[in-house]
Every structure is written in C-alpha cells, then in structure tokens.
Amino acid sequence: MSTVAEFMPTAIAHLSRWKQQNRRIAALTAADFVIAQILDQAGVDLILVGDSLGMVTLGFANTLPVTLEMMVHHAQAVCRGVSRAIVVVDLPFLSYQASPEQALLAAGRMLKETTAQAVKLEGGYPEVVETIRRLVQVGIPVVGHLGLTPQSVHRLGYRQQGEDPVAAEQIRQQSQSLAAAGVSAIVLEHIPEHLAAELTRQLVIPTIGIGAGADCDGQILVTHDLIGLSAQQPPFAPKRLDLRGAIAQVVAEYCQEIHTPSE
Ligand code: KIV
C-alpha cells in the first residue's frame, strides 16, 4: 500500500546533501501543468517557475512586467503537475526590492498559496542579502541568483558578467554573502566557466549554472530553449529539439487538409 511519504516532494535540504555526495542537480523551468508533469515524471530534480515565463510564455519583451499575481497563478499550475521534484519560484521584479517586509509578504504568500518549497531572488547587494537573511530566519528557503540577472536588464543588458577582475571579485564576495545569509543554492547565469568552477569549489552550498560551464553542481535551462519553442535562442543554450518547427508543420498540414475541398 502506498504511504503519504511516497508522494512527498523531495525536500529542499537534498540540495546540500547532493553537493556533499557529488551528485549533479538537473533543473529546468516550467510555467504550466503539462510541462511540469512531463519534467517531474522524466526525473528532473528541481523545477523553477522562473520569471522568464514573462518572455517565453506571456510574450513580454523582458521579465520586468511580471507580477506576483502572475507568478502565483503559474506556480499553482506547475505545483499541480509535480509530485516528486523540488519546486522553486522566482519573486518577480519589485515584489521584494522595496523592503524585507515586502519580500516576506511576497515569499510567504508563495509558500502559503502553492506547494513550492523555496523562492529565488536575484542579486547580491547588501540590501538583497539582508532580505534573504530575514526570509531564511522565518523559515522560507531561498535560492540566490548571480551573474546575468535579467531583472537588471536596463543596467546590465544580457551580456556575460564577471569578465573583468573587479566584476569577478564582486561576484565572489556576493556569493559568500548569500551563502552566509543561508541560501540553499545559487544560480550562476552567464559568467565565465573558470569563475563558476572556482565558486563551486569554494561554496558549501550547490551552484546551479546556466551558461556558466560544466563544472557547476547542477545545470538549469529554460525548457522552451531546450525543446526549441523559444522565438530567440540564447547563445549558451542550443536547442535539442525543434518543437516550434514540428508544431508549425503539423498545424500547416491540418490547415491544408481542412482548406482542401473534398472531391
Ligand atoms: O527566470 C528564469 O527562468 C531563470 C533561469 C534562467 C535560471 O531565472
């Protein structure tokens, strides 16, 4: 007979255990029930409801218009499809930067209204670190995000970060501050491979890389990029499937069939 424990999702604490065991973490994004269910059943360890959904699912030019309301809505759909993987949800732009109290209410809402186990916040400046410390203190697990942080697109663009020694040192120090504040893992996006490898060796918590080389403790991709659904492909994430092309072909064949007059 099945027990309740069998249907429990993997605990967020597994992330640090996996690092100790040198077990790599396979992570992908999801924004809806169907994709989440496929990823969960295929063995993905961590599913991120990333605010990139604003671009790949909702058609915005960047992630800035995404609201907390939208993230809760998509996170609820994803959580309905997941019975095993860890689910982490992004706090969107301006839902946590105003004050630790604002962040607490946003993150708390996410954990109360979905079955996600952690929230992800971008950046490593002292204000963000202070906010993360507060969330962790009240029992909200947090994943950090350094390097290319899309919510800062107007300041950083979508360029690789940490290339010069000063910028690399800033990322080093920010990663240590995030670890000290109690994050469960750090996403390293689009930074030089050697820097990501160095941080991975130094940190006791796992690094999850995207465009940061093969030496991170885990890898994450936007699922739409992986399966070829995105309109624009990032340089570090080649598609492994052309689902956009496959759908277009099937739909064109269907339309032709309907439009062709029968004899
Ligand atoms: O929003 C997102 O999908 C992300 C990943 C790129 C890590 O933050």
Image (cartoon, rainbow, N blue to C red):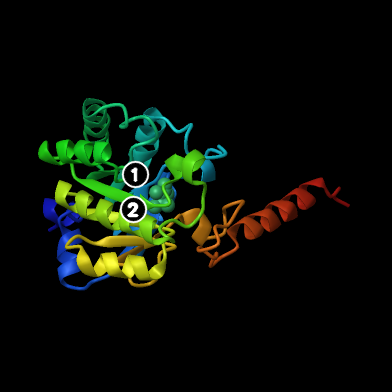
**Image location (x, y in percent) of residue 234:** 54, 57
- The residue indicated by pointer 2 is 47
Relative vertical location of residue 69 with respect to residue 6 in this rendering, above or below:
above
* Residue at left offset 35%, top offset 66%: 195
Is 177 on the left or on the right of 92, as rendered? left
Q: Closest to the observer: 184 or 128?
A: 128
Sequence order check: which comes first, mark 1 or mark 2? Answer: 2
Q: Label 2's element?
A: strand
**Image location (x, y in percent) of residue 19:** 19, 67
Relative vertical location of residue 194 with respect to residue 146 in this rendering, above or below:
below
| Kind of residue indicated by mark 1 | Glu
Q: Residues within 10 Å of mark 1 (few under 14, many from 20)?
A: many
Q: Closest to the observer: 116 or 61?
A: 61
* Residue at left offset 26%, top offset 49%: 143
Q: Closest to the observer: 210 or 230?
A: 210
Give the foreground label among 1 and 2: 1
| Kind of residue indicated by mark 2 | Ile
* Residue at left offset 84%, top offset 50%: 260
Report whether the residue tagged 1 is closer than 8 Å to ligand 1: yes
Q: Label 1's element?
A: loop
- The residue indicated by pointer 1 is 122
**Image location (x, y in percent) of residue 65:** 48, 31
Q: Closest to the observer: 232 or 113?
A: 232
Q: Residues within 10 Å of mark 2 (few under 14, many from 20)?
A: many
* Residue at left offset 64%, top offset 60%: 246
The CA span between labels 1 and 2 is 17 Å
